[in-house]
Image (tube, rainbow, N blue to C red):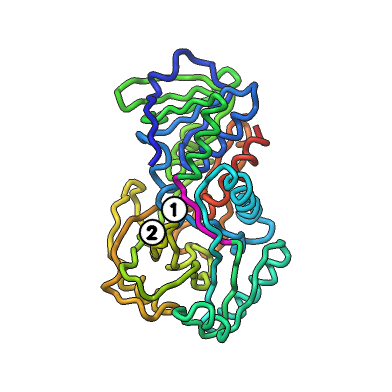
Amino acid sequence: MIRCVRLFSTTVSRPSEYSHAVIGGGAVGLAIASELSKRQDNRVILIEKNKDVGQETSSRNSEVIHAGLYYPVGSLKTKLCVEGKQLIYSEAKRAGVEMQKCGKWIVAQTDVEDAFIESMHYKAKELGIKTELISTLKAKYIEPAVDVRRGVLSSPTSGIVSAHSLMLFYQTTFENNGGEIAVGSKVTGLERVHGGYKISVDSLDGEHVDIEVDNVINSAGLYANQVSNMLLPEDRHVKYWYAKGNYFNFNNSFPEVRRLVYPVPTKGLQGLGTHLTIGLEGQIKFGPDVEWIDDPTDLKPNDHNKKAAHEAILRYLPHVMYEDLETSYCGIRPKLAGPDSKEFQDFIIREEEGFPGFINLLGIESPGLTASFAIGKHVAQMC
């Protein structure tokens, strides 16, 4: 967990001194602030409501570096995921960010699933992403513990990254460039004034501050809809649905698996299924499940879906015992559509019409961590 000690009330001395305010100190907000700070004429402040940056979605996910296989070819998710992956493996790796390119398998167990991974393989060729179709016989030789009934799509450029290490990289770059971080500072109001914006902030120590800035980037994650709704007229208000996902540690040394293992995703991509990931220290974990909730602060893990998660795991790893799964942690994904929706929902990253300099980032969920570096550059080009 990254520690920040400054509160907004001790950071701001007078209004109208910032060119950009980034609301939200997750991986995406930090990446955006980092990119904006690289321009010498920018004065950037990042505003985070929690005591530390990166406490919510960014530190409560699978920490997977996605290859960019799952989403439509022309979508922002695909574009920014592919670009973000490349930036993580190049710039972030050179800076010492902890990661491992371990590869990933997407396992097909039926004829329908086999046809799906074959279509993914050809889409990957179109995108220039390296993949390989592996037969059941070859899969058994490579990963004996994984049950493969029809075939595997292997993604060798997938991997894992320490979200903490990646966020620290963004934060260090930002602060070295003179950026300021105000933690414990909750945005309570946002309005258009004097050709710019007034942001009202309440700090944890009870202080209230109003500041004026030229540009506002709303990267508030689970609360981005609330920030957006402070500014935009009612007919443009945004509703979020919240998909909570619990993760389960695997408390056994057998079976041994050396790469990420995913089931074939379900239509609509509300999630990528209960998959196997490996921590940088070798710890196997499974998740996330999907539990629709109303409260985005509900970050207490539970085992309500443990039985269903175990049944899903058994489809590709039949030797896992129910007793070996231990509820570990959970995260929440902000969704722009509810549980009944089967349609693909792309990232929304846009300057809002009629509000110049206000950049809205909505529905930033998976593959947000992978895409964060590219999102930062994308938004910086918009400002």
Q: Amino acid at mark 2?
A: Gly
Q: Label 2 neighbourhood size at 10 Å, few (<14), some (14-19), many (20+)?
A: many
Choose between 198 and 303: the one closer to the eye: 303
Considering every residue shown, the one lying at the far top of the view is 14
Q: In this picture, is 209 found above or below 123?
A: above
Q: CA distance from mark 1 to mark 2?
A: 8 Å
Residue 374 can be seen in this image: yes
For the point 30% across and 73% down, the residue is 307
**Measured along the vertical axis of the image, is residue 203 above or below residue 1?**
above
| Tag 1 residue | 333
Q: The N terminus is located in which quarter?
A: top left
Q: Residue at 51%, 28% (x, y): give it.
A: 175
Q: Is residue 194 left or right of residue 296?
A: right
User: At 53% across and 82% down in the image, what residue appears?
Assistant: 141
Q: Which residue is mark 2?
A: 245
* Highlighted magenta segment, given as a residue range: 158-164
